[in-house]
Image (cartoon, rainbow, N blue to C red):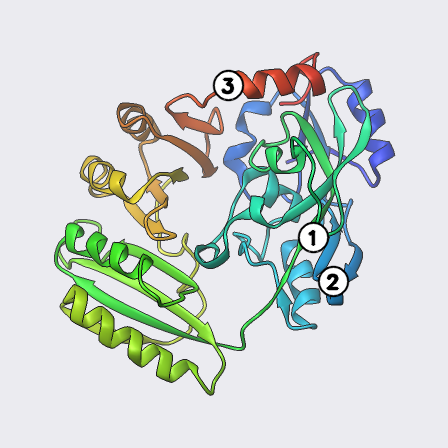
Amino acid sequence: MNGTSLRSATELQDFVRDNERVHAVGRASKPALHGHARDAAIADLSALSGIVEYQPSEYTVTVRAGAPVAEVAAALAERGQYLPFDPLLPDCASIGGTVAANLSGSRRYRYGGVRDFILGASVVDGEGRAFRVGGKVVKNAAGFDLSKFLVGSLGQYAIMTELTFKVFPDVPQFCSLHFRFAQLDAALAAIAFISGSVFVLDALDLLPSSPTNRGGWALLARLGGFAETLPRRAKRFVASAQRETAPLETLELEEQNGLWNPLAGLNGAAVVKVALSPGQVPALDAAISGMGRRYSVAGNVAWLATDDLALLDRVLRDLSLSGLCLLGAADRPVIGAPLERELSARVKQVLDPEQKLV
């Protein structure tokens, strides 16, 4: 996507003031988020990169919005730390784009998503004003937390230029397990049991063994820990899960690339993220049988692949669900049921009264 490369917040301020419609792009790893902005001036933030400040002892890191997720992850890994919300598309996404789209991977199951780990942000609003929201310390409490509001805002209220996160120590070893169930309701019952049990998991995902479900359902569970204790924990977990949920089969899987990438194996012209509850999974699954799909975070996030975006739009509307289009071509980033707009409209009026940011 062609745009104007901007290297500082000051350049971004001037760019916003000089253009009638502005759309911010990081590393363009999620093309479906940009199809609606063809007539806007493109603010390319990929050069607004680098780590501003990293304090391992304080478990905080501040980075510029265009920084590649992989670069940030590598710096944290050198000190045995990581971003617990598990940024999606780590090999090609920017940290700012990840936050703007609110995209986490399967490991968010344990500790939470982007909003749980963003501490503050520097932003430029629709009038070209630059300011800071939130803070750079873990203990920061105020009234309305605008930095958390901007998570998932797609840059339509203010454009983030710097972000501060809290980070955690990473675990050195993982064990991944596969439980097979014949029916969806049995797999969802297993999710409910595991989620309410004493066992601490890093991830819990559900996917059909085939697009038509003929092979049943695969429930993937991931435990993390230290080599001295992880095998015993995994053994106790498997024994409990087998006793309480009666899977048809239990296997230990190799920790291979792609196993815990929720988009791996999803084939379709478009890929869409849908937030939902486990109780909404059966109705959605019945309506989209044959589409590629994976239910992550214990059934609270659906990743869907489709060749018929219009059909999926109608399905989501009927179920009062909304979807965020990530990959493929889309005329608008959000499909399905309209999102609640009352608070958003008030914030938009304050930060972008001329409706410049799209």
| Residue 233 x, y percent position in the rendering | 37, 78
First-in-chain label (3 vs 2): 2
**Residue type at numbered disc 2:** Glu
Q: Nearer the viewer, mark 3 or mark 1?
A: 1
Residue 350 relative to residue 345: left or right: right
First-in-chain label (2 vs 1): 2
Please name the residue that numbered disc 1 is placed on. 138
- Number of marks: 3
At numbered mark 2, what does the secondary structure look like: helix, strand or loop? helix
Vertical position of residue 111 compared to residue 150: above or below: below
Quarter of the image with the C terminus in it: top right
Please name the residue that numbered disc 2 is placed on. 58
How packed mark 1 is, by other alpha carbons closer than 10 Å (few <14, some 14-19, many 20 or more), is some
Mark 3–mark 1 Cα distance, whole angstroms, equals: 30 Å
Tell me which residue sits at (22%, 50%) in the image: 211
Quarter of the image with the N terminus in it: top right
Tell me which residue sits at (24%, 61%) in the image: 218
> Which image quadrant for residue 287?
top left
> Which image quadrant for residue 72?
bottom right
How packed mark 2 is, by other alpha carbons closer than 10 Å (few <14, some 14-19, many 20 or more), is few
Tell me which residue sits at (85%, 25%) in the image: 14
| Residue 117 x, y percent position in the rendering | 61, 50
Vertical position of residue 350 compared to residue 117: above or below: above
At numbered mark 1, what does the secondary structure look like: helix, strand or loop? loop
Mark 2–mark 1 Cα distance, whole angstroms, equals: 8 Å
Mark 3–mark 2 Cα distance, whole angstroms, equals: 37 Å
> Dots 2 and 1: beta carbons under 8 Å?
yes
Please name the residue that numbered disc 3 is placed on. 341
